[in-house]
Image (cartoon, rainbow, N blue to C red):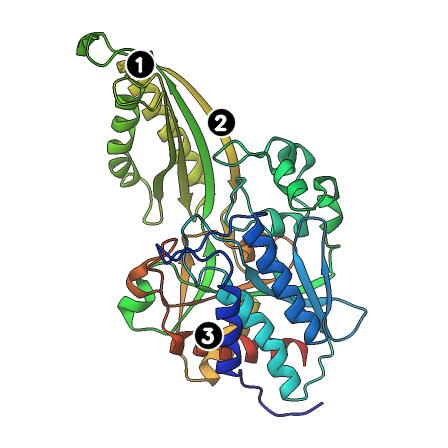
Amino acid sequence: MTTAKPTPDSARLRALFDAVNAFGLDAETGGFDRPAFSPADMEARAFFADEMRRDGLEVAMDGAGNVCGRFGPAAGPVVMIGSHLDTVPSGGAFDGTVGCAVALECVRALRDAQIVPRVAVEVVATADEEGRFGGMLGSQALVGTASPAWVERARDADGVRLADAMRAAGLDPAAIPSARRAPGSVAAFLEMHIEQGPVLEAEGLPIGLANVVSGVCVLAVTLTGTANHSGTTPMDLRRDAFTGLAKVGAALPGLARRGTRETRLTIGHVELVPNAPHTIAGEAHFTVIIRDTDRTAVRVMKAEVEGLVDRVAEEHDLGVHFDERSWIDPTPLDANLLATVQAEAAALGLPAKPMASGAGHDAQTMAALCPSALVFVPSRDGISHAPQEWTDWADIERGALLMLRTLATLVA
């Protein structure tokens, strides 16, 4: 084993990052479309697997579709490092992808420095982190919380069943439980991610270190009125589902202000039935995404949202139905591992801000299995989940160096 300090190869990292982003690029918008288990997603993961094989890693795709590459001892626990390659519709180039590219570059840099790890490193590109089907399937499968009942009922916004999407991609949904890792088999999980918010850029800081990740409740709501002619139905005799939806949406910011500093309420997917120019909406289907770093606050806010919807429904003579599509608890991240990353950042002269993560990440799910760390790099203007998503390459280089030095400390 050598005592040399490993350093990432920036050009090699950039080439890998760009190569992955050749998959799913929309030339018109500049966005990326790699929804989980789509052809573009599977092609990107196959490419990433081939890259790992070329570097001599032992590569496999597990029953949930996670792509994993092992470097180091064949037996014993692993330190897992990675992120995801799937995107939201018309997503950005950096979300998840940069974390996967950095993970593989860390292994390449260890080899460059002739560092033989005493603990194996496992690079992972997880499946469906973006929640096309309502959760974070890949990391939930690794932890063992992707239950068969959830898998059976999971559907995307277009009604496509998770099981059908997996089969179309050549995977067997019945094999998801086989992806579960045994307790003690993963010593730690490391993830680098863009912040997806404005804090680091606003404060002029290169690194954020998540100490807690917000919980997320996805609440599906249906308001049911009466579809009718828009010209012949008087305003006071309408049962307009869209009016109900609009009132709920307008009230959410005020409702959120009654929560905590970390409360976030968002209306996500919306569908009107019938969605026709001259017809009053008979049904409004929408999701409300509730986030907070405190579990009780999420539960309280869920009840507040349901109460708001009930009042609006009564006011406009609408039927209402709720369905809790998914629930992920707020997750404090391991303090000891956080201290290790902080020490490495200090040694590199990188100011690092402990902060809450408002977005869910695989590191949050993996915290139920092992100590997890989540390293943020700045997002320009705080923009993410959009083609305009951007992180300066110098910030990525700094984050990659911190990840590499932390990994080396854990495995060498």
**Residue 371 percent location from the top left of the image:** 61, 62
**Secondary structure category for the residue under label 2:** strand
Residue beneath disc 3: 399
Rendering quarter of residue 31: bottom left
**Given contact means CB atoms under 8 Å apart, are the residues at marks 3 and 2 in contact?**
no
Farthest residue to the right: give it. 75
- Ranked by sequence position, the earlier of labels 3 and 2 is 2
Query: Residue 347, labelled with which disc?
Result: none
Q: Residue 390: where, in percent of width, then height?
A: 36, 65
Counting residues from the N terminus, which is met first, the one under dot 3 or under dot 1? 1
* Image quarter in which the N terminus is found: bottom right
Q: Crowding near pointer 1: few (<14 within 10 Å), some, many (20+)?
A: few
Q: CA distance from mark 1 to mark 2?
A: 19 Å
> Residue 40, how many percent across, how many down?
55, 53
> Under tag 1, what secondary structure?
helix
Instruction: Check contact, mark 1 vs mark 2: CB within 8 A.
Output: no
Residue type at mark 1?
A: Glu
Q: Quadrant of the C terminus?
A: bottom right
Q: Position of residue 300 (x, y in %)?
A: 40, 34
Q: Nearer the viewer, residue 260 or 395?
A: 395
Question: Residue 323 bears which disc, if any?
Answer: 2
Residue under numbered circle 1:
314
In front of the other: label 3 or label 1? 3
